[in-house]
Structure formats: C-alpha cells, structure tokens
Image (spheres, coloured by chain):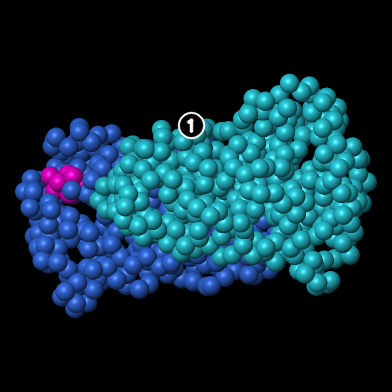
Chain colours: A blue, B cyan
C-alpha cells in the first residue's frame, strides 16, 4: 500500500511529466462521446428530459434531478451541499450537469464510469432523492400511463420500463446539455476579438502557471482519455497551506471513500471549468464562495503559487470567457395519473 | 356573533337561493380579468416568469414558486401538504396556479384579494420560502445584475426593484397560465362530439345534484363576482357524516383562521374544478387521494347526497373533461451572479 507521501510524489511527478505551457487550446465539440450501447434518439431524449424534471422520482415527490442540477442556472444549485428529501443534506457540492457528458468519470470521486451509472445513484441515495430502490421507482413509473407510452416509444414494446432504460434516457438527455460557443471557443476558432486583452492575459497566465496540466482538453477537465478511466488529482497537492484548515479541504477523503484504497486518499476527479463563473460556491465541499478566492486556493494548493492580485483577476477574467451558450430548455408536461395520487402522503 | 347553526343555516339558504339546475355552462375565456393598476406587458411577464422559477426567492435557495405550484404538472405538487425550506410542511394542500387568475380571492381561506397580494405571502412564510422579509428578497435581487435589468425593462428606471413590482410581475406571469380548450369548452362552444356520452351524463348529474350552485361560472369556482370579494362556502355544510372524522375535515377552521370572525368558521373559498383530474390529493388538507372519493365526499357533505357508483363515475368522467390545453412553458435562464454565491451557506 502506497504511503501518503508516495502518492503525493506520484501526483507531483504526473503533473511534472505533463507538458507545461503546451496548452493546445481546444474548442468544445458540438457533441460529446456517445456510448455504443446507448445511441441518441429523439424518443429517448424526450423521455429522459421528462424524467429529469419529475419530482416523483424522489420518495417525497419533491426532488427532481433538476432540483440540484438546475439547467436553468449553472447546472447545479449554487449551494455548498445540496438539499434532498426531508431537508437532508449531503456532504458534497452538486457538480454541474452542463457538459458532464465530456467528463471521463462521474461524481466528485469518480465512482461512476458513465452518465448512465451516475444517474442511478442519487435516486436511491437516502439524503438525495430517497427512493428505497429502483424497483420502487419502476413501480411508480408503471402507475403513470404517460410513462408507459414514453418508455415504449423510446425502447420498444418488450419490457421497456426498466431501471437501465430509465438511466439510459436520462443520460441521453444529459448528452444534449452542451454549451458551445463561449468567448473562449470563438477565440480559439479564430475570432481574435472574442476575448478582451485581460482575458487573453489570463489565458496565458493560466497556461504558464500550469493550470492546464490538469484542466486540460476542450472541457478543461483533464486530458482526453477514453471514457471510464478517469483523471484524478490529489487536492491539496501541496499540503500545509492556510487554506487547508480555513476551508476544511482534507476532511473528505475523496476517491478513497469510494475505493478504500490508500492511494486514493484525497484524489478527486478534475472538474470542468466551463461555466465555472455560474457554479459558485467552489470545490467538493462548496467552502469557497467566490471565483477569485477559488483561483488563489487552487494556485497555492496545487501549484504552490501565491498569485498577485493582477494574476488572479486576469485568470478570473479568462474563466468568465468559458461561459457558453445554453440551449433553450423546454421542460415537458409531466405525465399525469388522472384523479389519483401515486405518492404516499 | 352568529352561532354555528346560524352560519350553517345561512350557508344552506345561500345554496338554496342560487338557481339549481340553471347551470349556464360557460367556456373559459382566453384571458382573465386584468387589474387596472397592473396591465400585462411582455417585459413584466418575462420578469415574472423568471422570478417564478427562481429558488433564490427562498431562504435556503431551494424552493421556487414552481416547487409547490408546478406548471409542468397540474400547477400544484400532488401532495397533501407542500414541503418548504428545511423540509418544513404547512397545513394545507397547495392550490393550483393554473387559472388562479379567474379566482375571486386567493388562498384556501381567501385571505388575499389578488394574485399580487397572494404572491407576497409564501416568500416570507417561515414554512414555505422562509425569507425574513421582502427587504431581504429585494436585497438579494439587487445583487443579481440580470434582475436589475429585467426590473428596469418591466418598470422603468425609477426605483423599479421593489416588492410591489416583484409581485406585480409574478401575477402578470400567472395571468398567462390559462388552460382553455378542454373537451368541456369545445362541447359548450358547439362541438357535440367533444364529450363522451358518459361525460354528458356526468355533466347533467353534476348540475342536477346542485354541484353547480357553488362550482359555477367558467372556472367552476363560484359565480362571477368582482375580484376581491370572494365566494366562500361552509365545508362540511352537512355536519356529521362519516367523512368528517375519516378525513379530518373540521380541524382546520378555514377562513376563520384569517379573519377570526365566528361566522367564518369552516368557510372556504370554492376552488376551481378545472384540471381537477391532475391535482390529487383533494381538499384543503389533501386528505382524499382519488377524485372518485372526493366526489362522494362533496356530495355527502355539501348536498347530503349519497352517490351511486354510477353517479360518481359519470361525474368523474365529466370532471376529466375539464382538463384543458396547457400552453408550453419555456423557463428562462436564471440571471447569474458570476463568480460568487449570494445565498449564505
């Protein structure tokens, strides 16, 4: 079993071996990777969108996917910890659903290798949507005639109403939640007027400091890897800064909590920086309320750099250029159960 | 001070003096009454729609108007009691927002005379949206640049960001939430194929029994009255049925809780029956889970009639014909506060 320090050194070496400054800036593709066993179809996306907004997927009938991953906002809930059924709170800040289709693995600790697997989790998590199990979810959906129709339309007539199909549909909808055409993307594609002078400075500072070692690729969430492998980094990499106690950065063991492997202590999936200006508060525990402070914490804990005010401001200006175009959302009417209530009071 | 029995007799007389059987069936108008001091404008509706879907109007940032009055569903939350901030629950079932613009007064106990006045309530109710006061709401909105722009656009440059304007905007949006063109409406307008034979039977039974005495007018929520006056009925009117204890119908004192007038004990605003098939569970306390049972309870407690199965089924079939066309909703992106969090953790 590797010691804490071995892991630390390994992490540092992995940073060191990535090409600093290279930063081959990439625009966001218009579509994300699509798994072979879950091709996009209109019917599936329609079903997934309906499920995504339906609070009946929670025990109390009050929490939908959209409650914590609000697509009308930054794809999260702008809270340190999300609020689930009966006012319960989890221990981590909800990651954004926008562009999550480009992440190599899902959840802060990367415990799900796909959006499909991810979608299964919160529904039955007792502090999130609180359903007893997926059988209970399916029983409830079977009681809604409109869902029976939607599942048949998406998955055919042969036992379409299953947990696997429900999460396939939700994942298919989530793969439409892409925000291309940010100022950054337009700049990278050749429109040199798309960024302000300060933003270009911030972009260069971002690369020169080494932020791009981890926040790489078109989604700023790690170098392109085949899906399911994951790109994790230790946080904090440089231990002992004042931020560690100030923001309680090490209480949560990160990936270790999923794998129980010593080497995974304090490893976290590298989050996307796209639309980062919209997703305060920051980090796995949502302890940092502003982007300016988050940038300083990152520089210190990951790169052992104390930023000047100017550096921080430039980088923040650059990060604001990563806010993309959000496709209009038209939530569908939730299929009804005429004349009766299907959730126990 | 009137005694319980005097009030009961008065209620009975008021029923008796309304023209039974008359039932001048009316289709839903395409637009509701618009108050002179709050004309509809596109900018106002746009702002109101944004506010309606914004959970930042609640103390915890988790509850929007739409949480309990879900326009993607029946305009309510299909729960006996709504769940507000921190999992708190109120004592009454959320009424539907759809067609609420046609109601003479708002809230189950009619304590608000307009949608504007209604919209002020839940935001600062400790078990609903939990804001300390409207000053706190306005302070929060002022911190959102996008809202400053939206308020200016709707209300001009002279101190547009006020509580009065916020609720005017919300009410303006709510006045667009109209569901015309139900099978019933098409029938009334001359399409005799719009209702099934059973539905027509149910419609006649509904009138013959006297349901139309209270559920009158195009909204089935009382005879047309000038706004703000209200149409209240005692429930139960006929005391002593088994339903009274079974569904705990008299614990809540109704309008009395708002006015403290003896004569208002157990008076309730007559709710709309439009889209009633979508708004289970039923009554002020949401104690009745199915429409069939709700119809039997009403007949017994209000008209002293025990329905046959056939009568109940026919009436339920008719009530299902009151589900209208729901205009597509396109929730807007919530104005952001780039790089910072405005709700205290």
Question: Residue drawn 80% across and 72% down?
Answer: B191
Q: Which residues are magenta?
A: A293-300
Q: Is residue A240 above or below residue A255?
A: above
Residue A294 on the magenta segment: yes
Quadrant showing the N terminus of chain A: top left
Disc 1 marks which residue? B126
Residue B32 in which image quadrant: bottom right
Question: Residue drawn 67% across and 42% down?
Answer: B230
Q: Is residue A55 left or right of residue A246?
A: right
Residue found farthest to the bottom: A190
Residue A44 at least partly seen: yes
Question: In front here: A78 or A176?
Answer: A78
Q: Is residue A161 above or below residue A235?
A: below
Question: Residue drawn 86% across and 27% down?
Answer: B240
Residue count near mark 1 (Cα–Cα under 10 Å), binned few <14, some 14–19, many ≥20:
many
Question: In front here: B138 or B312?
Answer: B138
Question: In front here: A77 or A122?
Answer: A77
Chain containing the residue with disc 1:
B
Q: Position of residue B50 (x, y in %)?
A: 44, 55
Q: Position of residue A284 (x, y in %)?
A: 31, 44
Q: Is residue B305 left or right of residue B297?
A: right
Question: In front here: B95 or B36?
Answer: B36
Residue A160 at least partly seen: no
Query: What is the secondary structure assignment of the residue under circle 1?
Result: loop
Residue B137 in which image quadrant: top left
What predominant SS class does the magenta segment belong to?
Answer: helix
Q: Is residue B73 left or right of residue B153?
A: right
Q: Position of residue B345 (x, y in %)?
A: 33, 36
């Amino acid at each position: 079993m590797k010691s804490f320090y071995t892991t630390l050194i390994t992490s540092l070496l992995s940073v060191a071996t990535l090409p600093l400054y290279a930063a081959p800036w990439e625009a966001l593709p218009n579509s994300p990777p699509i798994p072979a066993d879950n091709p996009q179809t209109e019917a599936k996306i329609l079903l997934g969108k309906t499920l995504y907004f339906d609070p009946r997927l929670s025990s109390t009938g009050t929490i939908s996917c959209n409650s914590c991953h609000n697509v009308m906002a930054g794809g999260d809930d702008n809270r340190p910890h999300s609020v689930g059924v009966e006012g319960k709170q989890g221990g981590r800040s909800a990651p954004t659903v926008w562009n999550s289709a480009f992440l190599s693995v899902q959840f802060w600790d990367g415990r799900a290798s796909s959006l499909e697997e991810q979608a299964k989790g919160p529904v039955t998590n007792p502090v999130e949507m609180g359903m007893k199990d997926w059988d209970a979810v399916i029983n409830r959906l079977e009681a809604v005639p409109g869902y029976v129709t939607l599942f048949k339309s998406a998955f055919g007539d042969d036992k379409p109403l299953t947990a696997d199909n429900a999460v396939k549909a939700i994942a298919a909808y989530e793969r439409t939640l892409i925000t291309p055409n940010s100022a950054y993307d337009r700049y990278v594609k050749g429109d040199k007027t798309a960024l302000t002078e300060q933003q270009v400075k911030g972009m260069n500072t971002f690369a020169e400091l080494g932020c791009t070692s981890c926040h790489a690729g078109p989604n700023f969430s790690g170098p392109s890897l085949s899906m399911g492998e994951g790109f994790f980094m230790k946080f904090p990499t440089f231990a002992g800064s004042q931020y560690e106690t100030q923001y309680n950065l090490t209480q949560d063991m990160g990936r270790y909590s999923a794998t129980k492997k010593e080497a995974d202590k304090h490893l976290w999936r590298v989050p996307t920086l796209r639309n980062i200006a919209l997703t305060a508060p920051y980090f796995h525990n949502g302890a940092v309320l502003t982007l300016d402070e988050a940038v300083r914490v990152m520089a210190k804990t990951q790169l052992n750099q104390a930023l000047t005010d100017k550096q921080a401001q430039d980088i923040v200006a650059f990060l604001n250029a990563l806010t993309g175009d959000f496709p209009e959302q038209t939530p569908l009417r939730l299929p009804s159960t005429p004349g009766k209530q299907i959730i126990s009071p």
